Image (cartoon, grey):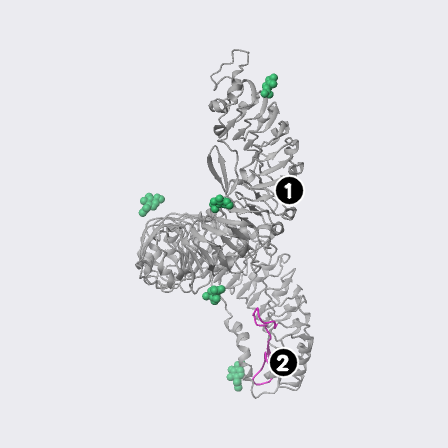
Amino acid sequence: MAIATMTTPLPISFFPFLLLIPAICFTICDANSNLLCIPSEREALLKFKNHLIDPSNRLSSWVEGGDCCKWIGVVCHNLTGHVHQLHLAAPLSPYEQSALGGKINPSLLELNHLSTLDLSNNNFSSMHIPKFFGLLESLTYLNLSRAQFQGAIPHNLGNLSKLQYLDLRGNDLKSESFHWVSGLSSLQYLDLSYANLSKATDWLQVTFKHPSLLELHLSACVLEDDPYLISVNSSKSLAVLDLSWNSLSSVPKSMFSLHGLVSIDLIFNSLDGPIPDYFGNISFVEVLDLHQNSLNSSIPNSLYSLNHLRFLHLSSNKIEQDISEILQSLSRCCLGSLESLNMADNQLSGHLTYQLGQFKNLSYLSLAQNNISGPIPSSIGELSSLKYFDVSENQLNGTFPLCFGQLESLETLDFGYNLLEGVVIETHFSKLMRLTTLKASHNRLRFEPNSSWIPPFQCQIIELGHWHLGSKFPLWLKFQKELSSLDISHVGISDVMPTWFVNLPTQFEYLNLSYNQVTGGISYLNVTNSIDLSSNRFTGPLPRVLSTLRYLFLSNNSFSGPLSELICNPSLKEMVALYIDINLLTGEIPDCWNHWENLAYLNLGNNNLTGKIPPTLGYTNPCMLNLRNNSMFGELPSTLRNSWSLVMLDLSENHFSGSVPAWIGDKLSNLVVLSLRSNNFDGHIPHKICDLQFLQNLDLAHNNISGVIPKCFSNLSEMATKIKINNELSTPYFIDYSFYLKALLVLKGREDEYGSTLGLVTSLDLSANHVRGEIPKEIGTLVGLLSLNFSRNLLTGNIPDNIGNMELMESLDLSMNRLNGEIPPSFSNLNFSNHFNVSYNNLTGHIPTSTQLQSFENLSYVGNHLCGPPLTKNCTSKSIPTDVGNKGSKVNWLYVSIFFGFVLGFWSVVAPLFFSKSWRIAYYRKLDQICGKLYVFWAAMGM
Ligand SMILES: *[C@@H]1O[C@H](CO)[C@@H](O)[C@H](O)[C@H]1NC(C)=O
Ligand SMILES: *[C@@H]1O[C@H](CO)[C@@H](O)[C@H](O)[C@H]1NC(C)=O
Ligand SMILES: *[C@@H]1O[C@H](CO)[C@@H](O)[C@H](O)[C@H]1NC(C)=O
Ligand SMILES: *[C@@H]1O[C@H](CO)[C@@H](O)[C@H](O)[C@H]1NC(C)=O
Ligand SMILES: *[C@@H]1O[C@H](CO)[C@@H](O)[C@H](O)[C@H]1NC(C)=O
């Protein structure tokens, strides 16, 4: 996001004087002191005013009989007294409702000498641009930008042959042709941005040939590639070309014949292929901005003939090149001119070279998100103009050069997510007086300054996650009075939370202290947006928080006491994610969730909570609800039916009872993971469960469920599908939420975490219930299953033959039932990589031969009447031994239950956040998109 907002080149405008007029007019309009306005013009102005709506009475000076040359916004000619200029732009203030509206009266036509008309930023709600504007012959300046005009641009504007400046930007306009523009023979500045010009296929022919045009802005005009190829009579004057936010798939070739070009902006188009190699003709270009396209291959040599280049922005493309080559070539053309270089988010490789230090005017450098390796050259200390330096998310190694301390102009320093190592000392920051942003998380650096160190900077953002900051809470933070975002997660602090920190006079937007060993209680945190204190040793009651807070992560601490003060605080309306899992919370979950309208993630798992699920919780309609491993009881409240957004519901390891409600299948139709494991649920498995078309993990193990296995399980289409595209969960509105989800899978006593691959995990676990009857052959159609566990039930009959066709199966447990017959020969097709167990049934005959089946231990087969390897018993004799059954009654239950099947646990959200910055950003974006609850988090953070 930083890339989009911070790298836009400074606007080049050839019209500074024109742009300034509106701003200064309100103060200088009295200059016409000795003039009396012309009565007919005064009447015309009054008539114009009378048709306007002026809610804030801005035109209060416009009164009958007054000297109209002294009216606000009116400028008369200093000799003739004719009204020359009307400056009626509304101030761009969100607080003032001073936009003019209403109708625009043609009485303006009486102002024969009107040369300037500025109605920008007003609200002519959906009115067409009046046709009579085309009759205001004296106009040289017309600004109707952002004034809520709509409809077709009147072509008779093309009659304004004196017009030099036309700004229609930011309205809802369209035009099907550009022919009218060729009539504007004096035009120098044209801005039609945001008009729909998709049908005006002559846009390029007209504008590129225009003899006087200096500056052209056609941003977001739905322009497509030039269908014609013009080459002759190209404009020599056009200097500024802005075609950003269109649908161009190639750079118009005719652009390269505009010899006067100084600034080219083609950002956010669909340009692909290599950057064209025609820059030789347009060698005066100073600004070249092509970011956010799909340009690939390497930078063409002709680009290095632009020896006036000041801004080169190619970020967010697919350029593959060695950075040292690029620096080498740029040092030949633009060593003295280059001020801003942004090549972030490409596929650059290689090392940074000493040449970097030779770009004396460089003030902005971003090479973030590439594959650049090697050390940061110490020549960087010579970049005395450098204000912005971002090399985050590369593979830079070596130390953090001391020379950074010399960069007096530096404001933003970001080298997070690299492989730098070593010790950082105070000198590294010695002259960084202007530093406001220090982002350096995820390096192997150690920084333990003298306890008396006072940093020379006042930062707003400090991110030092994964550094080694020593065991004491960093005292120097005490002096950061402007701090609003702090990440000192995983830095080895093992200290009491200092009171000075809690009482810092600053208000944080974002605070991350996770993965330390901070102890003590916290009564209050002055943080507006996001708090992460997870994995520390905080104790005491839950802290009080601001009502604006959106993300609160307190997982894995020792917070204790009840939830009610936090949950029942009616001002907490903004919360999106609340994680207090793995703490010592006690008491009931209070029934006051009515105001938690934005809640999307709730994790209260692994506490000591009791009571029932409060009815109001059902109305919050989160995407994830995790209450696992508490002491809660009772039936599921029917209000939970309203939580149709639920994708993950984990109520495992409690004492919930009653039957599994059929409405889960009806109402919670987005469920991907449903775990009711280890409770007291009874009754049958409702057939409605089979309607959950997205369900991938169903865990009902360790309950009192009876009845039979529903045949309709074969309708669980996600389990019946083998091919999963891109590991993604195919829910209706979740494209990929694996960023925040970590599932903890316990297989044969081994825990496996499934994060980004969770979309591939499918499991069905009904173990340790009272399910009886035969295993329906329909189970064999669930060919997407990786794990199937029916152990410890009362199943009878044969094992269906087609289970041998479930090729993805990695783990199958049918042990401790009453299954009889033979192990189907098709089982030799199965390719278990984890686990197989059919012990303690009444199976007979030969164990089918395959490399897998014979590789399991005897324990997988004992308690049957089986023979053949891996069992020592040979299959020669036809008689069925009878002594095995007796042994079976002395089952070592411990052994048998080593394999619990799938235990799906929702790991704290926190862990994945630290893997990569882009992950983390994506994570928050994802949080922000879910459930149609749209939030702007990182935008507000300025990230
Ligand atoms: C009138 O304005 C012109 C420019 O518009 C300026 O050059 C001239 O000095 C002004 N004359 C007086 C008397 O202010
Ligand atoms: C940096 O990484 C490269 C391999 O990518 C290695 O050869 C080199 O020794 C490393 N340098 C340092 C200082 O660790
Ligand atoms: C939070 O910090 C801000 C900024 O220092 C301060 O104005 C505000 O009073 C604090 N809020 C509370 C509730 O302490
Ligand atoms: C949970 O509560 C039970 C009884 O209420 C208590 O024995 C147990 O120690 C508590 N566990 C924790 C971790 O506080
Ligand atoms: C085991 O299977 C045999 C037939 O294969 C049957 O006669 C016997 O009753 C079964 N035993 C049990 C305990 O179900």
C-alpha distance separating marks 2 and 1: 64 Å
Which class describes the residues within 10 Å of circle 1: few (<14), some (14-19), or many (20+)? many
Which is nearer the N-term, disc 2 or disc 1? 2
- Specify whether residue 334 is painted magenta: no
Q: Quadrant of residue 693?
A: top right
Residue 731 drawn above or below residue 380:
above
List the residue tagged with mark 2.
60
Residue 120 drawn above or below residue 811:
below
Which class describes the residues within 10 Å of circle 2: few (<14), some (14-19), or many (20+)? few
* Place of residue 838 in the rendered image (x, y in percent of width and height, measured from the top left): 53, 25
- Specify whether residue 73 is painted magenta: yes
Nearer to the camera, 706 or 846: 706
* Place of residue 291 in the rendered image (x, y in percent of width and height, measured from the top left): 49, 55
Nearer to the camera, 380 or 272: 380
Q: Quadrant of residue 246?
A: bottom right
* Place of residue 809 in the rendered image (x, y in percent of width and height, measured from the top left): 54, 30
- Evaluate whether residue 658 shows in this view: yes
> In the image, which is nearer the foreground, mark 2 or mark 1?
1
The residue positioned 63% from the left and 31% from the top of the image is 709
Residue 582 drawn above or below residue 358:
above
List the residue tagged with mark 1.
664
Q: Which residues are magenta?
A: 72-98
Residue at the farthest bottom position: 34
Q: Amino acid at mark 1?
A: Ile
Quarter holding ligand 5: top right
Q: Main secondary structure of the magenta part?
A: loop
